[in-house]
Image: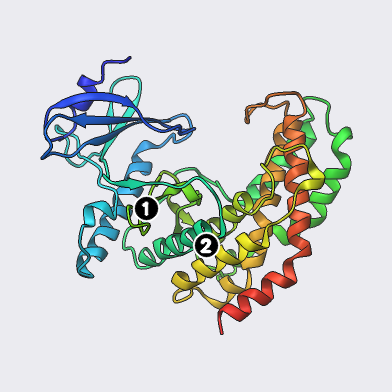
Amino acid sequence: MKDFSNIVNNFAIKGRVESVKPLGNGLINDTYIVKTSDESTSDYVLQRINHHIFTDVDTLQDNIAAVTSHIRRKLTNAGEKDIDRKVLNFLPVKDNPSKTYFYDGESYWRMMVFIPHAHTLEAVTPESSRFAGKAFGNFQAMLVDIDKNLKESIPDFHNMEFRLKQLHDAVAADPAGRVKEVKPLLDELESRADEMCKAERLYREGKLPKRICHCDTKVNNMMFDEDGSVLCVIDLDTVMPSFIFSDYGDFLRTGANSLAEDDPNIDGVEFNMAIFRAFTEGYLSSAKAFLTPIEIENLPYAVALFPYMQAVRFLTDYINGDTYYKIKYPEHNLVRTRNQFKLLQSIEAHTDEMKEFIKEKLK
């Protein structure tokens, strides 16, 4: 295994390092647990930042620093206890305390304090979804008044107009000769394009605000205490300005699909209303105090937006010859597209029911 001593020693850690071992199974960054030998000092988490995805590491880390320091101040002012377990704590670099990452000539590294006696959940159930909704709504609520201007760590990440432009460019080029094969799917997606781009239009008209959002809302991006209470939201790489739809809709895209997004059993794809109700109930309990009427009105639109956006992205990659997403067989991206489109159709069938549930919860 790589000798991490030189990397770790660039950070302001306390205690002597006893071991460095892989931690978790993250798909983006390489993560390690750094154990110290002294029980009075903390253990740490070391991460190699994937700078091929996060190309502007300064922006990435500046966003995270702004968000964590703001949340820390809020918790302190509220008289919260055990704050170091309720917000991530990134270490400064010894030779440059204003920085929270170190570049070794090949890779970018960062370290944070390990949160002991905590765990994540993997299973998406109504109970865990309710926890997630409340936690991510509260995360947004705490950042409504942040006084720092954050930038997009991945430009146009959830910009539907941009994603459609990518699709149109792929269709025009047709590099793999696949456009004719997928014409019916293209027609279905194009028929919804104007409606699905309304968030960007509303923003330009000054009717829809951008918030600081997590933009990767999954059940396993929350840390739970031993008593089952939520400690904090983690995995902050995608924290950036966005519409609240990013956190609300993207969770339901993955969490409320009856099947995995690449399951070829398209007929079995259904939108799980029990997950929707639980997540929405949790989200509104913590977010309704700051949400505007237009944000609330468009929550069902957000639920439809994200499977639509993902279908567009999968189909774009299929037309381009599978250059972005990893595939296991030649039609993998096409299967993903059809799966997400079927989910979208199921969501559309439940739209009135979703609107009624949200209306009832706001009474």
Circle 2 sits on which residue? 244
* Label 2: few (<14), some (14–19) or many (≥20) C-alpha neighbours in 10 Å: many
Q: How is the image coloured?
A: rainbow
Q: Position of residue 163 (x, y in %)?
A: 66, 45
CB under 8 Å between discs 1 and 2: no
Residue occupying image coordinates x 27% and y 24%: 20
Q: Is residue 207 visible?
A: no
Residue 227 versus residue 245: which sits nearer the camera?
227
Comes first in the chain, label 1 or label 2: 1
- What amino acid type is highlighted by mark number 1? Phe
Horizontal arrangement in the rendering, residue 70 relative to residue 240 (left or right): left
For label 1, the SS is: strand
Where, quadrant-wise, is the N terminus in this rendering?
Answer: top left
Q: Residue at x 12, y 27 (%)?
A: 16
Q: Which mark is residue 224?
A: 1
Identify the residue at image location x=79%, y=63%: 349
Q: Position of residue 292 (x, y in %)?
A: 52, 75
Instruction: Indicate the amino acid at tag 2.
Output: Ile
Which residue is most to the bottom?
A: 363
Q: How many marks?
A: 2
| Disc assigned to residue 43 | none
Viewer-nearest of labels 1 and 2?
Answer: 1
Q: CA distance from mark 1 to mark 2?
A: 23 Å
Question: Is 296 left or right of 92, judged from the image as shown?
Answer: right
Is there any visible trace of residue 349 in the rendered image? yes
Q: Is residue 41 above or below residue 272?
A: above
Quadrant assignment for the C terminus = bottom right
Q: Quadrant of residue 144?
A: bottom left
